[in-house]
């Protein structure tokens, strides 16, 4: 469940009969925003001020896609396009910088900052076996994420201005 503008609008991903769907809830009513019969695992929704709903596909390898949405009428205005192959869990800062969990050549995940042109501008921290659910803080100065390992999971916060990392929970 994620929020879209206006603030009282939420989205939810469902998989009825193996079909990936994105539903919108606003004003006490539910409507279908998007349906994908080929990809059932849609995850990690993020709203961009440019009018795009970003989401990851698959278990960390199907890429990040952008669906154009009219935020006033809450309808899709086109088909989704692939933004970042091999990435997942998008988050967007107020200035439009995209945060992704990207899979490197060794199979590890790494957090990267991507500009509006789709160019990776900066890698954040060291690669880890499995990173998911990355998100910018409201001020854009920190990033929170989950690290999953066989022994359990941890929640981390990266301070982008101090270039430091702190484990909050394990």
Image (spheres, rainbow, N blue to C red):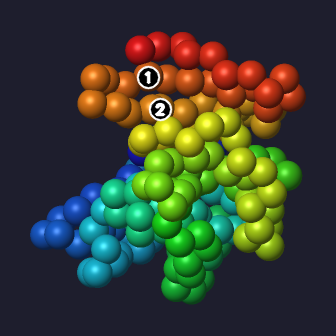
Q: Tell me the residue at 53%/57% (across/down).
A: 104
The C terminus appears in which quarter of the rendering?
Answer: top left
Percent coordinates x, y for residue 91 in the rendering: 63, 49
- Furthest toward the front, the residue is 106
| Residue beneath disc 2 | 146
- Who is closer to the viewer here, 49 or 75? 49
- Who is closer to the viewer here, 119 or 90? 119
Residue 95 in view of the camera: yes
Q: Is residue 25 left or right of residue 126?
A: left
The tag on residue 154 is 1
The N terminus appears in which quarter of the rendering?
Answer: top left
Q: Residues within 10 Å of mark 2 (few under 14, many from 20)?
A: some
Q: Residues within 10 Å of mark 1 (few under 14, many from 20)?
A: some
Q: Tell me the residue at 70%/41% (across/down).
A: 124
The tag on residue 41 is none
- Disc with the residue nearer the chain's start (1 vs 2): 2
Percent coordinates x, y for residue 39 in the rendering: 31, 74
């Amino acid at each position: 469940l994620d929020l879209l503008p206006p603030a009282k609008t939420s989205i939810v991903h469902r998989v009825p009969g193996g079909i990936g769907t994105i539903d919108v809830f606003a004003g006490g009513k539910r409507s279908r925003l998007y349906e994908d019969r080929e990809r059932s695992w849609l995850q990690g929704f993020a709203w961009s001020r440019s009018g795009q709903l970003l989401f990851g596909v698959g278990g960390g390898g199907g890429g990040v896609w952008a669906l154009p949405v009219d935020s006033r009428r809450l309808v899709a205005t086109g088909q989704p396009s692939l933004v970042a192959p091999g990435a997942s869990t998008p988050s967007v800062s107020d200035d439009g910088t995209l945060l992704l969990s990207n899979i490197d050549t060794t199979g590890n995940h790494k957090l990267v900052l991507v500009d509006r042109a789709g160019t990776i501008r900066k890698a954040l921290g060291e690669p880890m076996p499995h990173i998911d659910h990355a998100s910018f803080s409201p001020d854009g100065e920190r990033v929170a994420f989950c690290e999953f390992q066989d022994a359990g999971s941890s929640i981390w916060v990266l301070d982008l201005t101090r270039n430091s990392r702190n484990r909050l929970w394990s």
